[in-house]
Amino acid sequence: MSETGIDEVRNRIAAACERAGRAVEDVKLVAVSKRKGPDAVRALADSGLDVFGESRVQEAAQKIPLCPTGLTWHMIGHIQRNKARDVARLFSYVHSVDSLRLLEALDGAAAEAGKTLPVLLEVNVSGEGSKFGLTPAEAPAVLERCQTLMNLDVSGVMTIPPFTPEAEEARPHFARLRELRDGWRAESGFPLDELSMGMSHDFEIAIEEGATWIRLGTILFGA
Ligand SMILES: *Cc1c(COP(=O)(O)O)cnc(C)c1O
C-alpha cells in the first residue's frame, strides 16, 4: 500500500465518526512509525501529527532522540519484562500490557521514573490470530491487581483482531472488546474509557464500534 495524504485520512476518520454519530475529537490517532526513520516522523510531525507509536523498545530508544522534540511516544508492541524500565523512560503511554507480571514490572518502573504511566490492557478477544494479549477470562484478576498499583493509570483496553482481507470481518472482534470493557468497567470501577483498536485496513470499522485510539502505520507512512 502506498501512503495516503493525511488530509484524506482525516476525512475518512471524520466520515466514520459521522456515520457512527460520534464527535471527531473522541477519536485520537497514533502514527505507527515502526521500521520508519526520523525523517519520515519529521514529515508527519510537520503535517501536524504529534503522537507516534513504536512496537520495539530497542528501535524506539535509537530513534526517539533523533526525532523532533515535543512529540508523544506510545508503546504498542509486546514488552519483555526486563525492558520495563526503558519503557517507562521512553514512553508516555502503553497500549500493550499483556500479563500480570508485566503490569507489576511497569508499576515499579514508573515509580522509579517518578511518573504515572497510562496503560491499556491488551486483550486477545478471539483466542487466535494475535499471539499476545490477556484472555477475556484473565482480565478481571488483572484489573483487581490494578487497584493496588499506584503508579499506573489503567485507562482502557486494546486489541488486534486476526488479520482478514475483509475489514468487515474485524467488526465482531471490535464489538466484543467494547462489550467486555463495559462489563469490566462495571465490575472494577475503573472507567476504562479508552478503546485502542483499528489499523490501516480496518480503522473505519473500529471507529464505528467505538475506538478512541486508532493506530495507523502503512496508510500514513507507506509500506
Ligand atoms: C504495526 C502495528 C500497527 C499499524 O499497522 P498498519 O496496518 O500498518 O496500520 C498498529 N498496531 C500495532 C500493534 C502494530 O504492531
Image (cartoon, rainbow, N blue to C red):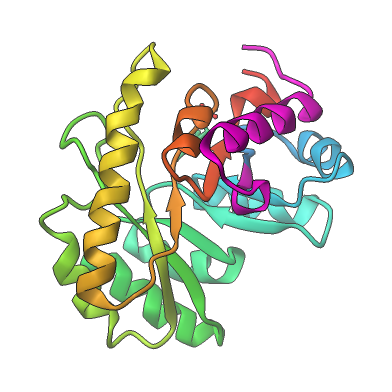
Which of these two is toward me, 219 or 178?
178
Q: State how many labels appear.
A: 0
Identify the residue at image location x=34%, y=38%.
174
Q: Is any part of residue 152 visible from this angle? A: yes
Which of these two is toward me, 186 or 95?
186
Q: Is any part of residue 101 visible from this angle? A: no
Quadrant position of residue 45 = top right
Identify the residue at image location x=39%, y=88%.
150
Indicate yes or no whether the magenta region holds residue 112.
Answer: no
Report the quarter where the C terminus lies.
Answer: top right
Query: How far across and down, in percent of the image, does residue 82 sit?
Result: 36, 65
Query: How far across and down, in percent of the image, does residue 162 sit?
Result: 29, 27
Query: How far across and down, in percent of the image, does residue 151 sit?
Result: 43, 84
Identify the residue at image location x=38%, y=11%.
165
**Relative height, residue 89 to residue 180 (above, below):** below
Report the quarter where the N terminus lies.
Answer: top right
In the displayed structure, does residue 67 sit left or right of residue 59? right
Q: Residue furthest right?
A: 46
Which of these two is toward me, 129 or 55?
129
**Relative height, residue 129 to residue 180 (above, below):** above
Q: Main secondary structure of the magenta part?
A: helix
In the displayed structure, does residue 172 sit left or right of residue 85? left
Identify the residue at image location x=64%, y=57%.
73
Query: How far across and down, in percent of the image, does residue 90 sit?
Result: 60, 64
User: Residues in magenta?
Assistant: 1-30
Indicate yes or no whether the magenta region holds residue 13.
Answer: yes
**Relative height, residue 35 to residue 81 (above, below):** above
